[in-house]
């Protein structure tokens, strides 16, 4: 699993395959139950979607048979790597709408998992999917209006951070009219709950994820998108 955490996908895949094979030879089913989900995630990230889906289906069947609800949550999160692989394929075909749909599916798996029961397998699955989501979230955030949670600064699409006072001056320059879609501020009670839940659920900050006033890693970015700002 350490190889997987560090992004060494081929090594992680081999480690999972060896552990599962040994488990089946010895009749000890516990390792195979644990490693089938992560192996599916590694296969999806390597582009083997058929192998990934087969691993997930087997992992889900064994989890249901053993009554491990938290493992089912972990497998659901791991399936987000298939969503990301499909998003990448859609991007290669120039299908922006399909790419967006698959990315949102992966993000929704992560957000839904925040409120679910958690154990080491769920936390591991969340960390892997957070890390895999970083490139797409950062790419999308460059094309979105980002506002600091404390209201101290904002960043326009494709621009640089600036004090929020500048945004207010722009508003005055428009005769008092509010900037487009700024009504989606993250101060509504429901949006605060989303942000708080995401922070509580984020157990690790993947490499490349910035820590500033607006984003607490990928989950913070997803929370911002959930407020409506991320769609700008």
Image: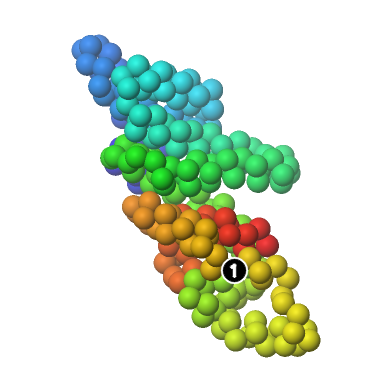
Q: Is residue 155 above or below residue 17?
A: below
Residue 93, by quadrant, is top right
Residue 208: x and y in percent read 44, 59
* Quadrant position of the C terminus in the picture: bottom right
Q: How many marks?
A: 1
Residue 155, by quadrant, is bottom right
Q: Is residue 176 above or below residue 212?
A: below
Q: What residue is pinned by disc 1?
A: 185
Drawn side of residue 208 relative to residue 170, left or right: left
Q: Is residue 190 above or below residue 7?
A: below
Could you say which is closer to the camera, residue 63 or residue 125?
Answer: 63
Q: Residue at x 38, y 51 (%)?
A: 201
Name the element at disc 1.
loop
Q: Residue at x 48, y 26 (%)?
A: 52
Residue 11: x and y in percent read 35, 35
* Mark 1 residue crowding within 10 angstroms, few (<14) / some (14–19) / many (20+): some
Which residue reaches farthest front?
189
Could you say which is closer to the camera, residue 129 or residue 222?
Answer: 222
Residue 205: x and y in percent read 38, 57
* Quadrant position of the N terminus in the picture: top left
Drawn side of residue 214 relative to residue 170, left or right: left
Residue 212: x and y in percent read 44, 70
Residue 18 shows in this picture: no
Q: Residue at x 38, y 20 (%)?
A: 64
């Amino acid at each position: 699993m350490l190889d997987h955490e560090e992004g060494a996908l081929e090594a992680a895949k081999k480690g999972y395959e060896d552990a599962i094979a040994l488990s089946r030879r010895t009749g000890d089913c516990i390792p195979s139950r644990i490693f089938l989900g992560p192996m599916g995630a590694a296969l999806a990230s390597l582009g083997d979607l058929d192998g990934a889906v087969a691993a997930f289906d087997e992992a889900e069947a064994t989890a249901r048979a053993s009554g491990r609800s938290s493992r089912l949550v972990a497998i659901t999160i791991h399936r987000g790597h298939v969503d990301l692989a499909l998003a990448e394929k859609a991007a290669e075909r120039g299908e922006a709408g399909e790419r967006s749909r698959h990315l949102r599916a992966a993000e929704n798996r992560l957000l839904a998992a925040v409120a679910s029961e958690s154990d080491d397998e769920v936390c591991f699955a969340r960390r892997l999917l957070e890390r895999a989501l970083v490139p797409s979230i950062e790419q999308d955030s460059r094309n979105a209006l980002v506002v600091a949670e404390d209201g101290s600064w904002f960043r326009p699409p494709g621009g640089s951070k600036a004090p929020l006072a500048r945004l207010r001056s722009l508003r005055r320059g428009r005769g008092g009219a509010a900037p487009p879609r700024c009504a989606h501020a993250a101060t509504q009670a429901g949006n605060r709950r989303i942000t708080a839940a995401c922070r509580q659920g984020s157990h690790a900050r993947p490499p490349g994820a910035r820590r500033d006033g607006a984003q607490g890693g990928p989950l913070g970015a997803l929370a911002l998108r959930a407020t409506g700002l991320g769609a700008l």
